[in-house]
Image: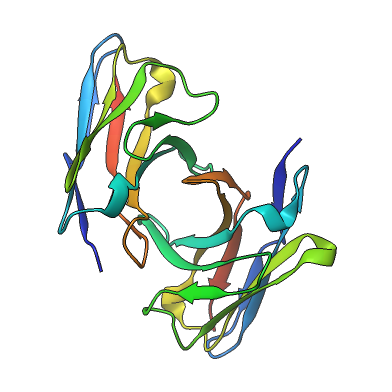
Amino acid sequence: QVHLFQSGAEVKKPGASVRVSCKASGYTFTDYAIHWVRQAPGQGLEWMAWINTGYGNTKYSQSFQDRVTVTSDPSASTAYMELRSLRSEDTAIYYCARYSPGLSLWGQGTLVTVSS
Amino acid sequence: EVVLTQSPDTLSLSPGERVTLSCRASQSINNNYLAWYQQISGQAPRLLIYGASGRATGIPDRFSGSGSGADFTLTISRLEPEDSAVYSCQQYGNSPPTFGQGSKLEIK
């Protein structure tokens, strides 16, 4: 059964960094790109970045260009998203999703709360 | 970046009715790479339509997508209670990918 499993909820202070993991199972990890999308409370979906899990090349939203890094570890079938210099507006559910085309498989989401 | 504007923002319909949701882009979407997602409260989004009109695996044929260029629609025929959700469009033909703000559908 194909699945994306994300790491658990995080609570961070402003200025800190957070790293969310996304482990794939049931398919060949490097056959599909992984996208990262977030959703602030009561808000719509916001695209953040994507990574070619086979070659490692990336593309970032300009909204996060200097604060976000996405990586992948094919040996562990896992993708990672790190967001730095957190602020309260970064409180959101962060999703990873597999592109095939369209985002056809989603992780369960990781709630990141930024609060002092 | 491409701005997607969805309409209406909210609507309330009865089971068995038909609904058409609109997604209008600020510029033409390359290759009509436009997707629709359903998000039920508390859940992750689910892909319904890709490439403007391709139905994703396991999606009932009550859901259909159409359109090209900068104007796209999602039609749900014969609404069922479980269709109550937020529907979002996404374009992935122009970089960077962007989402619409979503249309909230309530089933009475």
Identify the image quadrant of residue A112.
bottom right
User: In front here: A40 or A20?
Assistant: A20
Q: Give the side of residue B73 with respect to residue A53, left or right.
A: left
Give residue A25's position: percent from left, percent from top: 78, 47
Question: Which quadrant would the N terminus of chain A be assigned to in this image?
Answer: top right
* Residue beneath the point at 35% across and 39% down: B86
Vertical order, B49 against A65 (above or below): above
Furthest toward the right, the residue is A75
Determine the residue positioned at 39% across, 17% down: B81
Question: Does any portion of residue B40 appear in the rendered image?
Answer: no
State the image coordinates of residue B63 (x, y, percent, origin top left): 36, 22
Quick check: A42 left or right of B29? right
Residue, x 71% and y 58% (percent of image)?
A30
What residue lies at 21% left-to-right and 35% top-to-bottom? B67
Residue A82 rendering spot, x and y as whole percentages: 61, 78
Query: In the image, A97: left or right of B104?
Result: right
Picture mark count = 0
- B10 over A10 or under it: above or below: above
